[in-house]
Amino acid sequence: MTRRLAQWLMRYRVWLALFSVVLSIAFSYGAQRVYFQSDYRVFFAESNPQLKAHELIQSTYTKTDNLLFVVAPGDGEVFSREALSAVAQITEAAWETPYSVRVDSLTNYQHSYADGDTLVVEDLVPDPSALDADGLAKVHDIALSEKQLLHALISEQGHVTGVNVSLELPPVADADADPSVQKEQRLKRDHAFTEVVAFGRQVRDQILEQHPDYTIHLLGVPIINETFKDEADRDSKSLIPLMYGMIIVLLAVFLRSLGSVVGVVALIALSTASSIGFLGWWGIPLNQVSAIAPIIIMTIAVCDCVHLLVIYLRQMGLGDNRLAAMETSLTINIQPIFLTSLTTAIGFMSLLFSDSPPFQELGVLCAFGVMLAMLLTLTLLPAVSVALVRRRRLSQQKNVTLMEHLANFVIARPGKVALLTLVAALALVAQMPRNQLNDDTVKYFQPSVPLRDAADFYTKHLSGFDRIAYSLSCHEAGCVNDPAFLAKVKAFGNWYAEQEGVVFVNTYVDVIEKLNKNMHGGDEDYLRLPDSQALAAQYQLLYEMSLPYGLDLNNQINFDKSAVRILLHVREALPQDLIELDDKAQAWFDEHAPEMKTHGASIPVMFAHIGMKNINSMMTGSAIALIGITITLLIALRSLRFGLLSLLPNAFPAGMALGAWGLMVGEVNLAVAVVFSVTLGIVVDDTVHFLSKYLRARREHGDSPETAVRYAFSTVGSALLVTTIVLAVGFGLLLLSRFNVNAYMGGMTAMTILIAVVFDFLFLPASLLLVERWLGRSQRDGESQEQT
């Protein structure tokens, strides 16, 4: 059947090539519809419970979407006229930030105190230039004694301060809206991020021009989203051209055929362009994860091309004409190319089980690209190769000699080879627990990225970057001033302040207690909750009436005054630490205030949960992919024995790579969940190609197991070596990405592929020989018993 199909492909090669080019152009035309979405929300489905909890708090209180200026004076002293003037200048300018609704800083902090029977609420530093030494000392003492400032806007040492700009950004895209409306909403929101970041950088640069010895970092949601976009853009502009260059060099060195290189480059260009166009027709925006799809697709596409071209060039070297050589190559490679493409696509499609939409989209996009690359390999490449490659230029002598030595080595000692590779596999797999899951949003980026440097500086000198918010409800309008409710809120806040890693807790209780003290002449004995709800409500009303525009209490109390928000900062916390903190909080609610029980919410909490969920969901996806690939191989190989045997060399590489990663790096993120699924389909490819050649020798040539192993090594060994190098280098290039989700996935995938080819060159042929010898011995024993 494969020979008849090969003959058909060759007979109509020109028309098939034209068809494939037209089809690719049609798909590629959709690329004009593609746009990039940088919003961190792309990592979460609309149904994600942590996202829903976060959005609920965002809609109830002043939004926590913010732009934060982290300011460190050159002399290390915030409480100087110069430094406070700079802070005041940033504060005033920050009100002009696009979409700003509130600005909080050391200078405009609403300091309250009693003047006789009058409650005075005013800026802590109305005019920095008017402060003398005593005034500066007073500001210093007040700022460091205020719970709402310390470790939030001023460091304990008084050497770093912050100016926080709260933002009311355009709403997220409506999931039920028309795709064109969604695109418009997403682009508007992304443009808002760009506007905010551009303005923030402009203000920063103006201050640094006046104070060149200062250090000013920018943080906040717009900075995170803009960094996602910048890093994806950087990877696209640097890694994709680098990948093309690497492919051209490797193919030129190995194939030594300009026509072959031209054909392969044309094929991968059409494959990648069509895949991006497919995304446009699909109506899905590109994001920081799916942006690496072109690298993955072109890497895998090259492998199919190499297998087809190696046999083609070899047959020409043996004296076949161009048409006969290509027909033979197609006859030999149609089945393995189809199988490897199908198993790879199945592996990618298992990413649909991921809890994170970008990985689902990556899976579909890569599966489409792989199958299209297969189609182009069988339709376009034969026509191009026959037209451009007119004589053999391939020199494989060194590779052939290497493969012969490797075959002889395995044949001479299959038992020892199988045992040693199995022991090495188990030893590496045992190191998997060394890896620690870290889905910290900031740690997604390497230290050379400005966002990462800013977050590290902020965490070291000012506060904890990770935050958790709770909305505590008393279930009735106006009940937030009930002393009994406030007592429980205070107890919860005090309990949280004692937890490891928590450096800042902000509650409405701090405001109301200070007001109670102020209204009793500043008596420290009254730094406690008011005695009655009515009194607390009066204090709150009086305080809010004294506040300037934009600095109300909506960041702590909801509209109908039935709930309060507690906000805490956590320093140096792993994602699991945040989950454990919230679990402890749930236990506290169960014991002390079950009527107030609620889960904490924030962006760090969302990412902390998504990593664990992704691992659990991808275990199901990987199991289904494994079953699908197994069934495919059983049907294709027409042998239960060889179908099951083919999975053995592919069961260990991902676990071995993760163990080796644990020894070398020791840290993984949500990308680790997809590595097994991605690599399963890819590493099976080598096994399929080796087994197909082995079975061809056994079934069609009638060769012995040893001769069949030599035939497999001689026909496909060199191609497997080259494709492994291409795959490993291609995925390894992702290590150059400063976005660790892509870098970790690329690094672990490259490592898995390298380990897999070692298994296929050692464990697989050794296992084939051992099984064949055991079956032969069993058959001879059976025949001897019959004769007896």
Image (cartoon, rainbow, N blue to C red):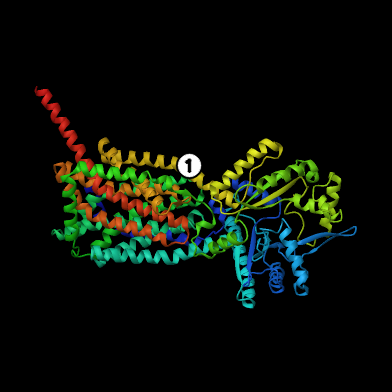
Residue depicted at 39% across the width and 48% down the height: 658
User: In screen coordinates, is 431 left or right of 124?
Assistant: left
User: In screen coordinates, is 47 left or right of 785?
Assistant: right
Q: What residue type is labelled 1?
A: Asn
In which quadrant of the rendered image does the C terminus lie?
top left
Q: Which of 30 and 457 is in front in this view?
A: 457
Kindly give the residue lying farthest to the right in the view shown: 117
Q: Which of 373 and 37 is in front in this view?
A: 37
Q: Which of 556 and 708 is in front in this view?
A: 556
Kindly give the residue lying farthest to the top in the view shown: 788
Kindly give the residue lying farthest to the left in the view shown: 787
* Dot 1 crowding, Cα within 10 Å, few <14, some 14–19, many 20+: some
The secondary structure type at the circle numbered 1 is helix
Can you give x and y, in whole percent of width and height, for residue 549 in the image? 78, 62
Q: Is residue 762 visible?
A: yes
Tally of marks: 1
User: In screen coordinates, is 3 left or right of 358?
Assistant: left
Q: In this view, does 729 lie above or below 685?
A: below
Can you give x and y, in whole percent of width and height, for residue 696 in the image? 19, 45
Can you give x and y, in whole percent of width and height, for residue 625 in the image? 39, 42
Residue 13, quarter of picture: bottom left
Can you give x and y, in whole percent of width and height, for residue 553 in the image? 76, 54
Residue depicted at 64% across the width and 65% down the height: 160
Q: Is residue 266 above or below residue 370?
A: below
Check disc 1 and report the residue beneath it.
616
Q: Can residue 379 be seen in this view?
A: no
Residue 254, quarter of picture: bottom left
In which quadrant of the rendered image does the N terminus lie?
top left
User: In screen coordinates, is 240 left or right of 575?
Assistant: left
